[in-house]
Image: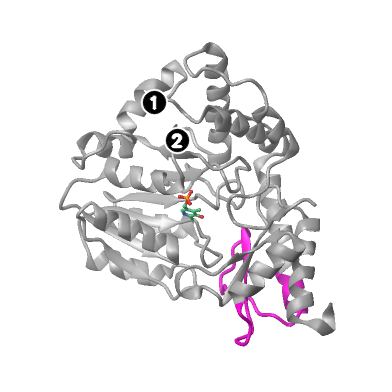
């Protein structure tokens, strides 16, 4: 029986993506690989909506987050993290691991960033080098209004860089790197981008390159300057996850053919459907500002969320994510991004319904 992935990363793969991964392995210093590499970079620019350079790293998404910290900052730099869930907290942890002491503006989980609160924090903390955001926080299923938030940073602190973790949001929800003046936008291969886990990307603008050249934190494997030097040769400085690069090229081809705006629209429609169906089951939504990538669902207090997820996985062969950190056992998260289809969501809802709302099953 096929196993259905309704998890917000990794997400299911289109059949043609599996197929290219079964082809003979390419060597990474060849023109054949260079052509595939270049297709990934060029197609990613369409998805990012940017003319900026796009860098490829063999790492999980967290590697992309760490790369932004080490490539932009110097010991003693002032930074601000806008937290809207577990992934905002991760930026804070990475900054602290490198000896920095970020100002943290935290929202109650389930709420998007509050523009006025951010403005106040920007005014109260002059001299920031960088401000860190999530596009969508996958732990809470909220989407942030990056257009407005980035504009506030540029207005109040014109020298501060806007660094965005779009690891789950890119290729799922509207994001305009250039139009919204996002200085650095990070992503990973395994969510909206419909490839296996293993690749991380960063779109980096000119202002950020200046910061990168001046930054003094230690770096080596993820040094953007080294990666940038390899771009004209259509390769990466170190051996990349070649198989995932070929997979990523194929999934980006599918996204290009569909059109990124159609991808956003399709994701929004499936999200609206899921939110409505969940409420029909008598369940409530966790997020006050819900994203289109996934729907967080509150579980009735007498339900053991961990057992529920285990039962659904083992008996119905469907993987649904639970809550992270303090939400563990209290919510489930149904993803509907990437190659996840309405039929998959329906199967997940049915599995939930028969356990939670027997009268509706
Ligand atoms: C998945 C995710 C990450 C971390 O990615 P890994 O590949 O697990 O390291 C970071 N931020 C967001 C918003 C994510 O969804």
Q: Residue at x 65, y 30 (%)?
A: 21
Q: Is residue 51 left or right of residue 316?
A: left
Label 1: few (<14), some or many (≥20) within 10 Å? some
Q: Which residue is mark 1?
A: 238
Count all numbered tags in the image, as a single digit.
2
Of all residues shown, which one is farthest toward the top? 31
Q: Which residues are magenta?
A: 275-304
Q: Is residue 290 magenta?
A: yes
Q: Where does the C terminus fall, quadrant-wise? A: bottom right
* Quadrant in which residue 103 is drawn: bottom left
- Up the image or down, 243 lies above or below 119; here it is above
Q: Earlier in the sequence, mark 2 or mark 1?
A: 2
- Res 360 visible: yes
- Up the image or down, 311 lies above or below 174; here it is below
Label 2: few (<14), some or many (≥20) within 10 Å? many
Q: Is residue 170 magenta?
A: no
Of all residues shown, which one is farthest toward the left? 76
Q: Which residue is mark 2?
A: 58
Q: Residue at x 18, y 40 (%)?
A: 216
Give residue 315's position: percent from left, percent from top: 75, 65
Q: In terms of secondary structure, what is the magenta stretch mainly?
A: loop
């Amino acid at each position: 029986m096929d196993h259905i992935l309704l998890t917000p990363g990794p997400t299911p793969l289109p059949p043609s993506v599996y197929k290219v991964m079964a082809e003979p392995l390419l060597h990474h210093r060849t023109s054949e690989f260079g052509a595939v590499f270049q297709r990934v970079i060029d197609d990613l620019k369409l998805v990012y909506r940017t003319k900026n350079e796009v860098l490829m790293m063999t790492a999980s998404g967290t590697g992309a987050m760490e790369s932004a910290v080490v490539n932009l900052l110097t010991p003693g730099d002032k930074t601000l993290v806008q937290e809207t869930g577990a992934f905002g907290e991760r930026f804070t942890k990475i900054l602290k691991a490198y000896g920095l002491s970020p100002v943290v503006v935290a929202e109650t989980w389930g709420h998007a960033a509050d523009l006025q609160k951010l403005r106040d924090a920007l005014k109260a903390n002059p001299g920031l080098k960088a401000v860190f955001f999530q596009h969508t926080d996958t732990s809470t299923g909220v989407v942030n209004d990056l257009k407005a938030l980035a504009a506030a940073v540029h207005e109040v602190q014109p020298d501060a860089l806007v660094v965005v973790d779009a690891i789950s949001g890119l290729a799922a929800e509207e994001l305009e790197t250039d139009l919204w003046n996002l200085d650095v936008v990070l992503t990973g291969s395994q969510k909206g981008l419909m490839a296996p886990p293993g690749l991380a990307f960063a779109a980096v603008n000119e202002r950020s390159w200046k910061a990168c050249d001046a930054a003094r934190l230690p770096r080596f494997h993820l040094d953007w300057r080294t990666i940038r030097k390899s771009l004209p040769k259509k390769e990466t400085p170190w051996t990349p996850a070649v198989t995932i690069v070929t997979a990523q090229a194929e999934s980006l081809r599918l996204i290009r053919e569909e059109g990124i705006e159609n991808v956003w629209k399709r994701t929004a429609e499936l999200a609206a459907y899921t939110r409505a169906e969940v409420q029909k089951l008598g369940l409530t939504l966790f997020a006050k500002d819900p994203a289109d990538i996934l729907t967080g669902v509150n579980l009735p207090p007498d339900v053991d969320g961990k057992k529920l997820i285990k039962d659904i996985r083992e008996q119905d062969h469907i993987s649904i994510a639970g809550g992270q950190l303090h939400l563990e056992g209290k919510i489930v998260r149904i993803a509907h991004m990437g190659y996840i289809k309405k039929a998959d969501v329906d199967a997940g809802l049915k599995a939930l319904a028969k356990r939670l709302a027997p009268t509706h099953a």
